[in-house]
Amino acid sequence: MPTDRTTDFLRELLVRQLTTWLPAALHRSRRATIALAGVDAGSAEAALRLVAAHRDQVRGRQVTMLVLADNAAADLPARLGPIEAELPAEVTVHLLPGDPYRLPVAVKAAGAAGAPLFSFVGLPGAVTPKLLTAATNGRTGELLLHTRESARDALVSAGFPLVAEVAPVLPGGDAAGVIAFGSRSDRSLEAVRDALWAVGAQFDVRFRGPLDPTGTTVDVVNDPDLEPLAHELLAELRAGGPQQVTELRRHTLTATVYRAADANRALTTLLDAGVLTRDRETGRLAGDETLRATP
């Protein structure tokens, strides 16, 4: 089970990502569904308060919130009731008994197909293809997953083309499992990584790559050491040939623990060192600009 510090970290991450996701979802669709499974009562309460804070954007649309809870969250109805009373009629909350593996049934029963779906799932055991496939919701789902180990391959196989992962390390060296995010949107990918770093700084957490055999951690509180990222990007260019800045930013998000903005700084360092060349002689690096490793 997550420690209190891990729970607080995950709760803040959930709120920050929902703050980005919900307005964007309501902008492109008249329906949106939020599914929470394997989270504590405080996280469900915080998520519903976030929805309530966006009541003006919710009006005229339909937002469904699913909460799968076990017996440990027996006080959840009492905690959510006062918030529900203040919500517009367009918001529906369903409290469902059961563990996170019932997510596919819950999503189907809610009629979420075809509309944006954001799922936040804490798994005590193995990741299952059925759960991940339900979270993709066709092509409209995004999943923030807390699990014991890397879920990258499983997420890609389920239909998430963009996957980011970090393994948080709490103060004192305590491991906090793996946080994985699956999406089809570069913008969402950037948003979740920025949220991770903001919450990491708040809780004095360091990050490492779940599959990094060296176990190297990155400090997110102070200015990060970009040398490992620079080495990674240079190796990517030497192995794969010329690439656009946008592609290298995506590689940073999916293959490292760094942010997209860190990629720009690392690439600028490599250009200054003369180990990369660019299309344009001067100016800010643009997304469509192609970079090459020097021979």
Image (spheres, rainbow, N blue to C red):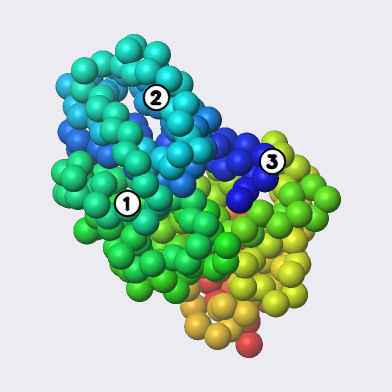
Q: Which residue is drawn at 43% across and 42% down?
A: 70
Of callouts 2 and 3, which one flags the residue occurring earlier in the amino acid sequence? 3
Q: How crowded is mark 2: few (under 14 residues within 10 Å), some or many (20 or more)?
A: few
Q: In which quarter of the image is residue 30?
A: top left
Of callouts 1 and 2, which one flags the residue occurring earlier in the amino acid sequence? 2
Residue 285 disc label? none
- Disc 2 target residue: 77
Residue 184's spot in the image, x, y percent? 34, 58
Q: Is residue 98 left or right of residue 289?
A: left
Q: Disc 3 marks which amino acid?
A: Arg
Residue 74's spot in the image, x, y percent? 45, 31
Q: Residue at x 62, y 37 (%)?
A: 8
- Disc 1 target residue: 103
Q: Disc 2 marks which amino acid?
A: Pro
Q: Disc 1 marks which amino acid?
A: Leu
Dot 1 lies on which element?
Answer: helix
Against 226, is 72 above or below?
A: above
- Disc 3 target residue: 5
**CA separation, marks 2 and 3?**
24 Å
Q: Is residue 169 left or right of residue 50?
A: right
Q: Residues within 10 Å of mark 1 (few under 14, many from 20)?
A: many
Of callouts 1 and 3, which one flags the residue occurring earlier in the amino acid sequence? 3
